Amino acid sequence: MKPLKDILKALKKYQLTGEPERMITAICFDSRKISRHAGGEGTDLYVAQRGTQTDGHRFIGQVIDNGCSVIVCEELPEEIDERVTYIQVPDSMAALGHLASAFYDYPSKQLRLVGITGTNGKTTTVTLLHRLFNEMGHKAGLLSTIVNKIGAEEVPATHTTPDAVELNSLLARMVEAGCEYAFMEVSSHAICQHRIDGLQFAGGIFSNITHDHLDFHKTFANYIAAKKAFFDHLPSSAFALTNIDDKNGLVMTQNSKAKVSTYSLRSLATFKGQILDNNFEGLQMRINGFEVFFKLVGKFNAYNLLAIYGAAVLLGMPQEEVLRHMSMLDSASGRFQIVRRGDGCVAVVDYAHTPDALQNVLETIVDVTDHKKEVITIVGCGGDRDRTKRPEMAEIACKYSDKVILTSDNPRTEDPAAILEEMIAGVPDNKRKMVSVIENRHEAIKTGNMLLNNGGVLLIAGKGHETYQEINHVKHHFDDMEEITNCFNQ
């Protein structure tokens, strides 16, 4: 438990009505999770947020009936309950992060927290940074799309960035477990929804930005602004590491108080890389004068490696030791994972679910095969997400492939056939004959395997690490790696 007056020190602006001498047992923003505490031993603190689906202010009466006696809200209820302490704030969503941080004793200040934001590369970068630091003898935590980790302990991930309460709870567990560092993906949704408010970052990394999540942000300008806000709020004690080969790389850091460093494959930069060789075995690179072989494949991974190297050096790690350990790192789950068939054919499973990511992966495959092998691409688009990218994904698949199979991804609440119709609209007239539509993803992968021959490459894009297919709010087991491995072994 923690005294309310100590937690309230985290807020810059609030108005208190009622008794300030309360003991807080938990912070909740979900009215269904309020607990009644026996014998009056403390109370949960309920934060009433205005969300896109519902308004938490509607449930204030309900949580009071369930035993909650401290309410944070933007608007006081018409009837004030004398048993209850009300804290009125300008923005409940923004207040939640600061309150959660204070409740858990500001865990982000007790370790070195590094966040990465951008459209692509976030998961690979944080996953490999986590592995790198643990292998170098520094216990670290991980907050990623795939999984959260406290040292080696795995905690399932439900969002790219957890809610503010869960986030601070996980960071507090990392501190308790002796972690010195934590690496986390910072999504644009999390920035806009104030999930990272109240955290102190030791560093921030920008990977790249392309069209994505326009269903949420509405415009590309809003999407850029969301990413930029992360760097705008970094403290002067932090570093800001940005990819200057992306045209918005320096835009991200132009107002940042943090110390700005850069990485690039094309220009002079703090961390300069050069690709010497790129094949299905890995990358031979020169980084700041050191020549190293990495197990990761592709130009997009060269950028991820530069970000990892730069962040590690900026955190004070010795350059040569960093590169030595990096050379032993394997790819993150579902990120350009390679499966080999006995006859020399190759399948690549990748999470590429944006036009830019799909293009990066296909360009890598074409480059590695030197345009001499047939490329077959299986791809779909998720339902209830940005619809503008659907025809673009199909067009890119056709541009770089010899055969394309359009299939279902996670249709969620949409009709899979309708999603595929929107994808088909992007297929050029002269490429129609090379495109098949097989809605059933299992059958699509099975067909791709049958079509694959003569040392060709089959790309299965869109789901990567996911082990489910979401249809009408139900998650059915489905694993692309499992599917293609079974096909190859038959």
Image (cartoon, rainbow, N blue to C red):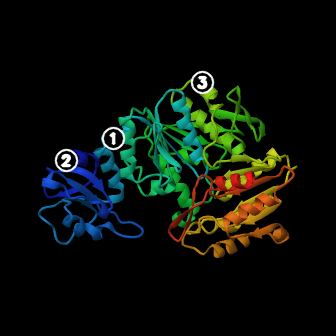
Q: In this view, does 392 lie above or below 197?
A: below
| Mark-to-mark CA distance, 2 and 1 | 15 Å
Which mark's residue is nearer the viewer, 3 or 2?
3
- Residue at label 3? 321
Q: Which of 351 and 235 is in front in this view?
A: 351
User: Measured from the top left, where is residue 27 in percent x and y?
Assistant: 29, 53
Q: Quadrant of the N terminus?
A: top left
Amino acid beneath label 3 = Glu
User: Is the C-beta separation of discs 2 and 1 under 8 Å?
Assistant: no
Mark before the other along the chain sequence, 3 or 1: 1
Q: In which quarter of the image is the C terminus?
A: bottom right
- For residue 106, the mark is 1
| Mark-to-mark CA distance, 3 and 2 | 47 Å
Amino acid beneath label 1 = Tyr
Q: Nearer the viewer, residue 170 or 196?
A: 170
Is residue 285 in view? Answer: yes
Q: Nearer the viewer, residue 134 or 318?
A: 134
Amino acid beneath label 2 = Lys
- Residue at label 2? 5
How packed mark 3 is, by other alpha carbons closer than 10 Å (few <14, some 14-19, many 20 or more), is few
User: Measured from the top left, where is residue 325 in percent x and y?
Assistant: 61, 28
User: Is label 2 in a helix, a strand or a loop?
Assistant: helix
- For residue 398, the mark is none
Q: In this view, does 489 lie above or below 56?
A: above
User: Is label 1 in a helix, a strand or a loop?
Assistant: loop
User: Measured from the top left, where is residue 299 in percent x and y?
Assistant: 72, 43
| Mark-to-mark CA distance, 3 and 1 | 31 Å
Mark before the other along the chain sequence, 3 or 2: 2
Which residue is painted at 62% across and 59% down in the image? 211
